[in-house]
Amino acid sequence: MATRLKEVDVVIVGLGWTGGILAKELAEAGLKVVALERGGLRLPQSDFTVPQVRDEIRYVIRHDLMMDTQKDTLTIRNNVSQEALPMRRLGSFLPGDTVGGSGVHWSGHTWRWTDMEFKVRSRYEERYGKKYLPEDMTIQDWGITYDELEPYYEKFERVAAVSGKAGNLRGKIVPGGNPFEAPRANEYPLPPLTPLLAQEMFREAAAANGYHPFPRPSANASRPYTNPDGAKYGACQYCGHCQRFGCEANAKGSALISVIPIAMRNPNFELRTHAWATKVLKDPGAKRVTGVAYTNVLNGDEFEQPASIVLLCAYAINNVHLMLLSGIGEAYDPVTQKGVIGKNYCYQTGASATLFFEGKHFNPFMNAGGSSTTIDDFNANWQFDRSKHGYVGGFIVAGAFNTSLPIGYRPVPAGTPAWGTEWKAATAKWYDTAMQINMSGSVMANRYNYFDLDPTYRNAFGLPLMRMTFDYKPNEHRIGEHAAQVINDLAKSMKPTHLNPAVARTGPWTVVPYQSTHNTGGTIMGTDPRTSAVNKYLQSWDAHNLFVVGANVFPHNSTYNPTGPVGALAYWTADAIKNKYVKNPGLLV
């Protein structure tokens, strides 16, 4: 029998970037807030100090900061004709499992998505005609505009200590930045990170080939910084241990060192760790929810936390899973295309080349998560004609080092034996003399890429696992093929001693190797309850006091990392709750 607790104003499921932002903002507004986090609390001053934080076995091989697949996982298949099987070990993506979420172990890449994404269907139809979009491509406009989100982007960038160089200040193109970005009201809060040799070589080659290179914006503080809330950041040390690790210098933008500690100092806020949400409770007679059921994973005790407002702020996949388990909204059916919960799951595609140079020394052990020079000529550049290549979306290309670790980073030319004396000699020779050029490409929604509940497998709580049905479609194959050509042409222009060329991902997608933790969709936003789960304020159409926040609301996935719009939308939603919903509860649209 679950223990029913005293009602609070707000219960938040998940305390990463979105949960932390909403907890801080709503507690400051005077609301009583409880946050439920399935993971434990790591303290930077004790858990992320040298030398223990630089433990590749613990954090990379054993996934110390990530989801435990022995307790909960997904089943995976490429298409509806296959039997889905459980993902027994993390691979393709790495959801966080700690206070602070995936923002504790991310690299920090922070982009502003623009109206090219928010108005994706209408823009493509206007330029290329309605017949250009494949029939099974279920992309849609988001119901929000860049102009509405611009001040919230800036707020998030200043909180997260983003380093970068503006390319478009109030409509004026600025040298050194991304000339294809949307207008910004102000410069980034911090200047770009110090470029590495690989970045400089890529910049020269990209410019020589007619492209427009710029330093990638990233939440890695390039110098000591105090954000507007008073949270203090150290300067990035270029330690080489960024992705999958906590930050030893407190230089990486993280809710764990910014909004969460501020919320925890507020008497209106309470954090409960090891609290695994199992169901959102509904009022059967009204279009509202009443709270959250959860289990203490340390002792098995069950609780019900009543609340006037429920906020789902867990990792994108987990938000969708909880909606499906709770029966809120109609589950999506790819055959009839009815229902919305689980619809439009998207991922990203990629490719990379490795370049080997006799006599060059790149020092790959010194880098930051944002050590990247990038070109955006095939993504945000709306003048780029996609019809020549027959795809929707785009890609960015970068010369970069990001967490090239002592055990895992072993670049060798193609044809080198996979083990033995010759392999050892090659790793010693080429470790310091190789660099990479890589790309990240968008994935457009397809009617047959979706989530639902698995009919066979269950998690540690006896609840159905979520089933992921996903594969790259011809659209993504064409993006990958074009990007590989661009990468290889750039690489050859740099005249490396050896080149392992980029190859497009055109075979069946597999969950085994790591690719990116950029999972989107499943509870998508829009203007029509028939085709979306939440409105522009991320408010559920089916329960007006339920808000679902995270990349799960994205109707498709950009080439850009999702954290920029995730953070901006969290502040946007916080403002809507404080200034609109609390004053007049009900649907805001």
Image (tube, helix red, strand yellow):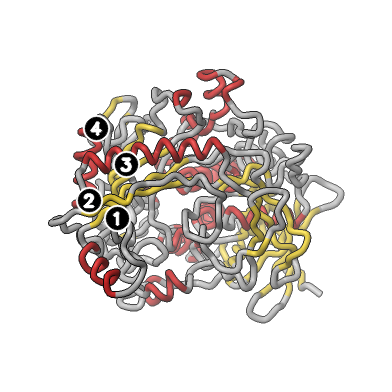
Q: CA distance from mark 3 to mark 2?
A: 16 Å
Which residue type carries mark 1? Phe
Which residue type carries mark 3? Asn
> Do the residues bearing badges 1 and 2 touch, measured as CB atoms within 8 Å?
yes
> Do the residues bearing badges 4 and 2 touch, measured as CB atoms within 8 Å?
no
* Label 1 element class: loop
Residue at the disc numbered 1: 401
Determine crowd level at label 2: few under 14, some 14-19, many 20+ residues with C-alpha closer than 10 A.
many
> Do the residues bearing badges 4 and 3 touch, measured as CB atoms within 8 Å?
no
Q: CA distance from mark 1 to mark 2?
A: 8 Å
Q: Earlier in the sequence, mark 1 or mark 2?
A: 2
Q: Nearer the viewer, mark 4 or mark 3?
A: 3
* Residue at (44% x, 44% y) in the render: 504
Residue at the disc numbered 2: 198
Q: Earlier in the sequence, mark 3 or mark 2?
A: 2
Which residue type carries mark 4? Asn
The N terminus appears in which quarter of the rendering? bottom right
| Residue 282 picture location, percent across and down | 79, 54
| Residue 245 picture location, percent across and down | 39, 66
* Residue at (29% x, 64% y) in the render: 240
Q: Nearer the viewer, mark 1 or mark 4?
A: 4
Could you say which quadrant of the image residue 383 lies in? top left
Q: Nearer the viewer, mark 4 or mark 2?
A: 4
Q: Earlier in the sequence, mark 1 or mark 3?
A: 1
* Residue at (28% x, 32% y) in the render: 211
The C terminus appears in which quarter of the rendering? top right
Residue at the disc numbered 4: 209
Q: CA distance from mark 4 to mark 3?
A: 12 Å
* Label 2 element class: helix
Q: Nearer the viewer, residue 201 or 507?
A: 507
Which residue type carries mark 2? Ala
Q: CA distance from mark 4 to mark 2?
A: 17 Å
